[in-house]
Image (cartoon, helix red, strand yellow):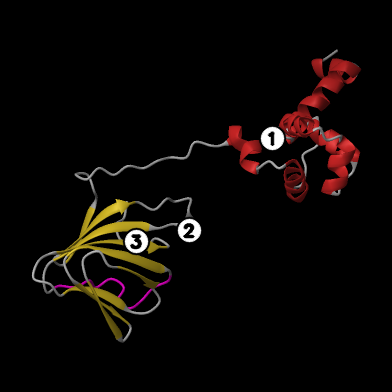
Amino acid sequence: MTPLQRADNNPEANEINTKEEKVKRIPYHFGEKLRHAREHKGYTLKVVAMRAGVSESLVSQIERNHVSPAIDTLLALADVLDINLEFLFEEYRKERPVTVIRSDERPSMFEDDIIYEELARPADSAKDCSFESYMLKIPAGSHTHRGSYGHIGREFGIIVKGKARLTYGTREYILEEGDSVSYSSAAPHLVENVGDTELTAIWVVSPAQRFIEK
């Protein structure tokens, strides 16, 4: 008799396999937290079920981690028990990667006499929510060229040092040190240094245009 045949003929083994499959299908075991919160408030299963608009048996199964509730049911239970979802899922937080770019290790790109120093590299997984950020260094009398035809997305900039003129479509805006600006990138735009010294600015573009390739 093979191991598989032995398992088929063994009710206890089949029951164990079924339980293991259920555990795999229910990755988040927060039933204990819901039960503790309910008992702490002195609520019965019936009270919680009535207030959440679900059956008493469903609440019982959720507390015992026998079923995984729909998000609207979970929200209703959390509201009745006055707890937040962060409390329920806190142990399932994933470690998110943190990227540090040292000041002396910034990738740079030159556009004529303008320097783009990368401050934040776009994440491949971010897609439409991605952004990139640069430290712009523009000599007196010079201006950017990228964006002169417009592109999708939005931009944000802040003048760190110097004086700039933003040409956006047919309009112009003078930006002094400490001023910030944001706009849709769809219209043609460029930043010009109209001061006597080097212009330094921080610029953020979203979604990322990947001015500096990997």
Q: Residue at x 48, y 53 (%)?
A: 126
Q: Is residue 189 above or below residue 58?
A: below
Quarter containing the N terminus? top right
Q: Secondary structure at mark 2?
A: helix
Which one is in front in this view, the residue at disc 3 or the one at disc 2?
Answer: 3
> Which label sits on residue 129?
2
Name the residue rendered at 48%, 50% in the picture: 125
- The numbered mark, 3 or 2, whose residue comes first in the sequence reads 2
Identified by mark 1, the residue type is Tyr
The residue singled out by tag 1 in the image is 28
**Residue 207 percent coordinates (x, y):** 43, 62
Q: Is residue 143 magenta?
A: yes
Most frequent secondary structure within the magenta stretch: loop
Q: Residues within 10 Å of mark 3 (few under 14, many from 20)?
A: some
Give how far across and how far down residue 147 sits, in percent: 31, 73
- Judge left or right: residue 123 versus residue 48: left
Stretch of the chain drawn in magenta: 142-152
Q: Which mark is residue 188?
A: none
Mark 3 element type: strand
Name which residue type carries label 3.
Answer: Val
What is the distance, in whole Å, between disc 2 and disc 1 at their CAs?
Answer: 27 Å
Which residue bears the numbered disc 3?
204
Residue 103 in percent (x, y) is at 22, 45
| x 79%, y 30%: residue | 39
Task: Say whether residue 148 is visible.
Answer: no
